[in-house]
Image (cartoon, rainbow, N blue to C red):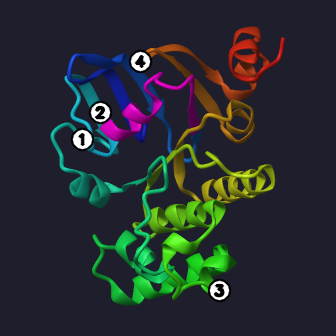
Amino acid sequence: MSLLEVRGLDAHYGAIHALQRVDLTVEKGEIVTLIGSNGAGKSSTLRVLSGLLRPTAGTVTFDGRSLIGLAPHAIVRLGIAHAPEGRGIFGTLTVKENLELGAYSRSDRAGIRADISRMMVRFPILGERAGQSAGTLSGGEQQMLAVGRALMARPKLLLLDEPSLGLAPQIVQTIFAIIREINQEGVTILLVEQNAHMALRVAHRGYVLETGEIKMTDDARVLAASDEVRKAYLGIG
C-alpha cells in the first residue's frame, strides 16, 4: 500500500476547475515532484492534501486512512506537514517562536525542545538568530525557517511548495541539498517546484501537470530526458 494515494481528484475555485481527475501515488521514502507551468494545479494539489482546499470529487488516502473531510490540524496530526508557497512565516514572531508553532500539535515538551535544538544545528543561521523577528530574515533564511517549522511536526510526509522561489542560485543549491538530506533521514517528500531541472535532479519520480490534469508520469531521470519535458520545462531544444 502506498503512503499516499490520490484517485480521480477534482477541485474547484468557484467556477474554475483547478484539478481534473488527478491520480498520483507517493511511496514511503520517496521524493516525488510535481512540475508544470504557473496555474497548472500544483499548489492546488498540495492544498487539497493538507486540507486547505476541499475536493469536489475523488479520494485521498494517507497511510491507509481517508483524508477527505478532515480539518488541516487533524491532517497534521496524522503526519502531513506543509511548507507553503511564499513560506508563510509569522514575521512579527521570533525564529524560535515560529519553530515552536510548528510543534503545536505535540505535547512532548522535552522532545520539542530537543527538536528545536536539532533544527538550529541543521540550519545554523536559525540558531544564530533564534531571538530575532522572523520578518527580518533574508528570503533564503525564511525558507529554511519554513522547512524547519514544518519538520517540527515530525511528519511522515512533507509537502514543499516552491522552496526555491525568488532565491539566489547559490541558496537554491543549499535548499535542494537540505531536501535530499531530509529525505535520506526517512522523511517522504512531495515537492512542487517551478525549477524543473533541480526538482528532477533530486526526485525519484515525477508528474507533469497541465491545466489541472496529469499529462505525464515516470522516473525522474526519464522525464528529464524526455524531449517534451526538456522543451517545455527545461528550456532545452
* Mark toward the viewer: 2 or 3: 3
Q: If you read the primary sequence from the N terminus, does the residue marked by circle 4 or circle 3 appear first?
A: 3
Residue holding disc 2? 60
Q: Nearer the viewer, residue 194 or 200?
A: 194
Which of the image's four quarters has the N terminus?
Answer: top left
The label on residue 170 is none
Residue holding disc 3? 128
Q: Is residue 33 left or right of residue 79?
A: right
Q: If you read the primary sequence from the N terminus, does the residue marked by circle 2 or circle 4 appear first?
A: 2
Q: Amino acid at mark 3?
A: Glu
Residue 23 drawn at (x, y percent): 40, 21
The label on residue 212 is 4
Q: Amino acid at mark 4?
A: Gly
Q: Is residue 186 above or below residue 145?
A: above
Residue holding disc 1? 67
Q: If you read the primary sequence from the N terminus, does the residue marked by circle 2 or circle 3 appear first?
A: 2
Figure label count: 4
Secondary structure at badge 2 equals strand
- Image quadrant of residue 76? bottom left
At a point 67% along the width and 37% down the height, the residue shown is 199
Residue 177 drawn at (x, y percent): 73, 55
Q: Amino acid at mark 1?
A: Leu
Over which residues does the magenta segment extend? 32-48
Is any part of residue 3 visible from this angle? Answer: yes
Is any part of residue 1 visible from this angle? Answer: no
Q: If you read the primary sequence from the N terminus, does the residue marked by circle 1 or circle 2 appear first?
A: 2
- CA gap between label 2 and label 3 equals 40 Å
- CA gap between label 1 and label 2 equals 6 Å
Q: Is residue 83 above or below residue 129?
A: above
Q: Amino acid at mark 2?
A: Val
